[in-house]
Image (cartoon, coloured by chain):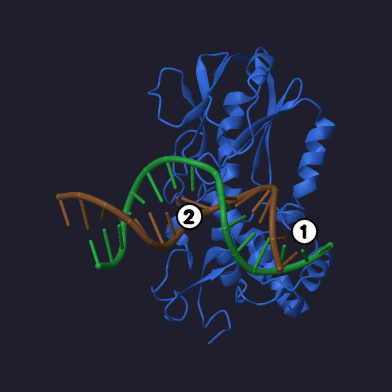
Chain colours: A blue, B green, C brown
Amino acid sequence: MPELPEVETVVRDLRPHLAGRRLCTVAAGDRPLRRAFAPEWAERLRRRRVRDVRRRGKWILLDLDAGSLVVHLGMTGQLTIGPAARPLENHTHLRIGLSGGRELRFRDVRRFGSVTLFDQPADLDAFLADRLGPEPWDLTPAEWRAALSATSRPLKAVLLDQAVVAGVGNIYADESLFVAKLPPTLRGCDTTPRQAERLRRAIPEVLETAIDRRGSSIRDYIGGSGDRGSYQREFRVYGRFGEPCLRCQTSIARIRLAGRSTHYCPKCQGEA
DNA sequence: CCGACGTCCTGCTAGC
DNA sequence: TGCTAGCAGGACGTCG
């Protein structure tokens, strides 16, 4: 579910509550996640202290005084902090009691998410470097153009490729393409430098506004304090199949691309 | 090597 | 009303 703005919101919500806290109790469920949570990690995590909470792409990094706990929310993951005594929701896979009496919880209905412990910073760095390209703000015009010219894939597929640019998912790919006025089907290698630059600039523009709104809550997503986002009210194409384009009134189209539902305006995005 | 596609899992809803 | 096919903010393994 969550893309960069949602993950960033969770990190910002959690940081003030987690930084400096000690992990006092760790209780993991036994249902398998995308990556197995090793049972011995529970004992190893106890008494460690949280130094900082960071985000890289869609990954949440809890840096400890030794090692890092790395969380991916998958499609339906929720990482929340609140009173230890709050009602326990189903599909809660991990509970970490903190000094100060609050409890961090990982809940994930579909279990596409994961919680992994890295003891060595070098291992974590390698793990992230293996699968993630630059953050959208660090993507340079030259490397973006190079990535596009090297592939025959459609722009939609390139945007979803975390190794090219980290953090963009299905919603913000569609929204960025609308802002850039480019068809999602346009092949990377057929993109002109001007078009490439429009898209490169559209991505942070869309993401920054979404972060301001605390992300998009369609069904499962909630922030680290349980609050919903509101950017879904500002979607220009995503989820608006058949509705009028806010710019030109043309009916928003929906196709299947890169295995994902893809929304666009046939007129504004140049496929009239 | 690259790119397209299936799979993991549960829950909700549109449509019969 | 009740059932079922299809779909959902992601990542990754496999296959051609």
Q: Which mark is residue A241?
A: none
Who is closer to the viewer here, C8 or A144?
C8
**Marks 1 and 2, how far apart in space?**
24 Å
Q: Which residue is mark 1?
A: A139
Vertical placement of A250 versus A97: above or below?
below
Name the element at disc 1: loop
Q: Chain of mark 2?
A: A
Foreground residue among A3 and C7: C7
Q: Chain of mark 1?
A: A
Residue at the (45%, 56%) spot, across then down: A232
Check disc 2 and give the amino acid type.
Answer: Tyr
Where is residue A124? Give x, y as percent: 78, 35
Q: Residue A240, position in %: x, y? A: 42, 68
- Against C12, residue A90 (above or below) is above
Q: Along the line of sight, which residue is nearer the eye, A10 or A38?
A: A38
Nearest to N terminus: mark 1 or mark 2: 1
Residue drawn at x 54%, y 14% is A100
Instruction: Report which residue position mark 2 lands on.
Output: A231
Same chain? Circles 1 and 2: yes
